[in-house]
Image (spheres, helix red, strand yellow):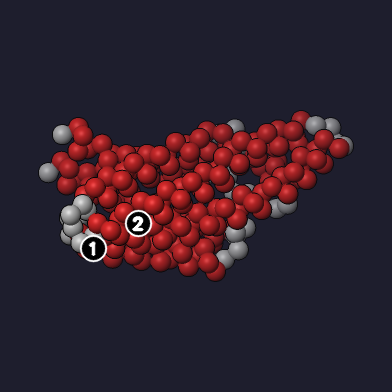
């Protein structure tokens, strides 16, 4: 019984941790100096980003369990592709979160404790130079996560192990995520919103998997 609960619990816990971290994450606006100031003033900055990072392997483990449920069904190939693309998505998302949680925090500390002069200027310069790479990776991760959600949803619809509405809901969530990542620049809130529906779909799917496992 415990083994059957492992995958749905991992998916549900991983997705919920990502939701909590996203809710607690401060809004970064303005130029590099303003963003570094916001980061430095957020006492939970590192904890928020570690919550994100620890949620990723949990969610991936749960998605592997979702794929296992579709073995020997018409949806098997789709969910296998979903695992591959989802692994890529979480790998790219990890780069963004690790940069902001590690380098971003260190640069914010250097910026705020330094006297006005070259040290603070260099911190802003490095942040401005490196952040576009992190944001580009984030945009790519949002598109890949949307695509993987579509693949998982396609497999769920074909496998008929879980409710069919999970399949249609996942296809819609993934399509919206890919559209947001394609249309909007990586430094906009709309692009960041690409992660919202796929993660919420994981919460709902994890709950459905848990009911099946307990039943």
Q: Is residue 7 left or right of residue 93?
A: left
Which residue is more in the foreground, 194 or 112?
A: 194
Residue found 70% across the figure and 37% down from its top: 108
Q: How many labels does the image show?
A: 2
Q: Position of residue 177 (x, y in %)?
A: 45, 62
Alpha carbon distance from label 1 to label 2 = 15 Å
Quadrant where the C terminus sits is top left
Task: Tell me: residue 137, above or below residue 10.
Answer: below
Looking at the image, which residue sits at the far top? 113
Quadrant where the N terminus sits is top left
Q: Which of marks 1 and 2 is in front?
A: 2
Going from N to C along the chain, the mark reached first, 1 or 2, is: 2
Secondary-structure class at tag 2:
helix
Task: Tell me: residue 58, above or below residue 147.
Answer: above
Residue under label 1, please give it: 157
Residue found 76% across the figure and 39% down from its top: 123
- Dot 1 alpha-carbon crowd within 10 angstroms: few under 14, some 14 to 19, many 20 or more: many
Viewer can see residue 40: no
Q: Where is residue 47 in the image (x, y as percent from the top left)?
A: 52, 33
Q: Where is residue 127 in the image (x, y as percent from the top left)?
A: 71, 45
Secondary-structure class at tag 1:
helix
Looking at the image, which residue sits at the far left? 215
Task: Tell me: residue 106, above or below residue 213.
Answer: above
Residue found 74% across the figure and 33% down from its top: 110
Which residue is more in the foreground, 65 or 188?
A: 65
Residue under label 2, please give it: 81
Residue found 61% across the figure and 35% down from its top: 102
Q: Which picture quadrant has residue 114?
A: top right
Viewer can see residue 38: yes
Q: Position of residue 95 (x, y in %)?
A: 56, 44
């Amino acid at each position: 019984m415990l083994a059957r609960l492992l995958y749905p619990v991992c998916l549900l816990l991983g997705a919920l941790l990502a939701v909590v971290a996203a809710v607690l994450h401060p809004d970064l606006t303005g130029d590099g100096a303003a963003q570094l100031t916001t980061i430095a003033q957020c006492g939970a900055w590192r904890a928020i980003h570690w919550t994100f990072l620890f949620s990723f392997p949990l969610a991936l483990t749960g998605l592997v369990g979702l794929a296992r449920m579709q073995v020997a069904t018409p949806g098997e190939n789709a969910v296998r592709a979903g695992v591959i693309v989802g692994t890529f998505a979480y790998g790219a998302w990890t780069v963004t979160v690790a940069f902001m949680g590690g380098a971003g925090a260190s640069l914010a500390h250097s910026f705020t404790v330094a006297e006005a002069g070259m040290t603070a200027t260099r911190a802003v310069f490095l942040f401005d130079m490196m952040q576009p790479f992190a944001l580009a990776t984030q945009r790519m991760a949002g598109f890949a996560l949307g695509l993987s959600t579509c693949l998982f949803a396609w497999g769920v619809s074909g496998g008929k192990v879980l409710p069919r509405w999970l399949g249609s809901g996942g296809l819609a969530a993934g399509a919206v995520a890919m559209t947001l990542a394609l249309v909007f620049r990586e430094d906009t809130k709309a692009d960041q919103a690409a992660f919202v529906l796929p993660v919420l779909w994981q919460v709902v799917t994890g709950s459905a998997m848990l009911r099946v496992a307990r039943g």
